Image (spheres, rainbow, N blue to C red):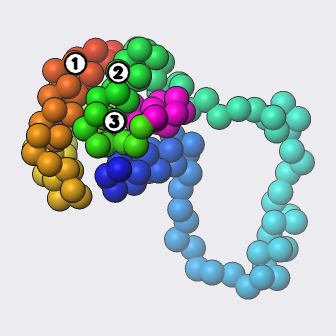
Amino acid sequence: MRRFVMAGMVATALLLAGCSSDSEPSSSPDEVAESLAEEEPAPDPAVEGAEDTSVQDYLDEHGITDAMVMRLAAVAEANNYADPPMAEPDAQLFATVIGDHCETVASGEKTWDYYKEDDKSTGGTQAQVDAFYGFTQDTFCPSMTSKQ
């Protein structure tokens, strides 16, 4: 599996989950324990058992159906972008990564050539890259919608 896919999936998962890194100076263990004891509110029973729906929310907001997710996964597997069989949660997360690629290219921030060259630099053959991005550009991205 390509390194960019895994890195992209992790980055997207972190972005969708709302994680961020802080660049504050490190504190002593006593300060950290003291800070945690003071700032930690009581857990909200309604939130405690809540399921993370950020991936499904992204798919829904962009009109990415289960059929689109599974078709993208099949194309990814056939072109060595993922090890078969891709489990449904992995396929959904992968679809968010590729959906983000679609949006990034549409905004002009990056190009398809950028993604293709990146994939070739991590071991993708020209045929695999062409087949995967041919499907992505011609079928997957145009099928996405935005309800925003």
In the orientation shown, which residue stands out farthest toward the bottom? 28
> Does the magenta-highlighted stretch encompass residue 102?
no
Kindly tell me whether residue 50 is visible in this rendering: yes
Kindly tell me whether residue 106 is visible in this rendering: no
User: Which residue: 16% across, 21% down?
Assistant: 138
- Report the residue marked by disc 1: 139
Residue 17, image x, y percentages: 57, 43
Callout in the foreground (2, 1): 2
- Report the residue marked by disc 2: 71
Q: Residue type at mark 3? A: Glu
Separation of disc 2 and disc 1 at Cα? 10 Å
Q: In the picture, which quadrant includes the C terminus?
A: top left
> Where on the picture, by quarter, is residue 31?
bottom right
Callout in the foreground (3, 2): 3
> Does the magenta-highlighted stretch encompass residue 95?
yes
1 and 3 marks in contact (CB < 8 Å) = no
User: Which residue: 46% across, 17% down?
Assistant: 66
2 and 1 marks in contact (CB < 8 Å) = yes
- How many numbered dots are placed on residues in this image? 3
User: Which residue: 31% across, 43% down?
Assistant: 81
First reached walking from the N terminus: tag 3 or tag 2: 2
Q: Residue type at mark 1? A: Thr
Q: Nearer the viewer, residue 34 or 136?
A: 136
First reached walking from the N terminus: tag 1 or tag 3: 3
Residue 45, image x, y percentages: 88, 35
Q: Residue type at mark 2? A: Arg
Our reading of the magenta stretch's main secondary structure is helix
Badge 1 marks a residue whose secondary structure is: helix
- Report the residue marked by disc 3: 77
The range drawn in magenta is: 85-96
Along the horizontal axis of the image, is 126 left or right of 106? left
Q: Nearer the viewer, residue 78 or 20?
A: 78
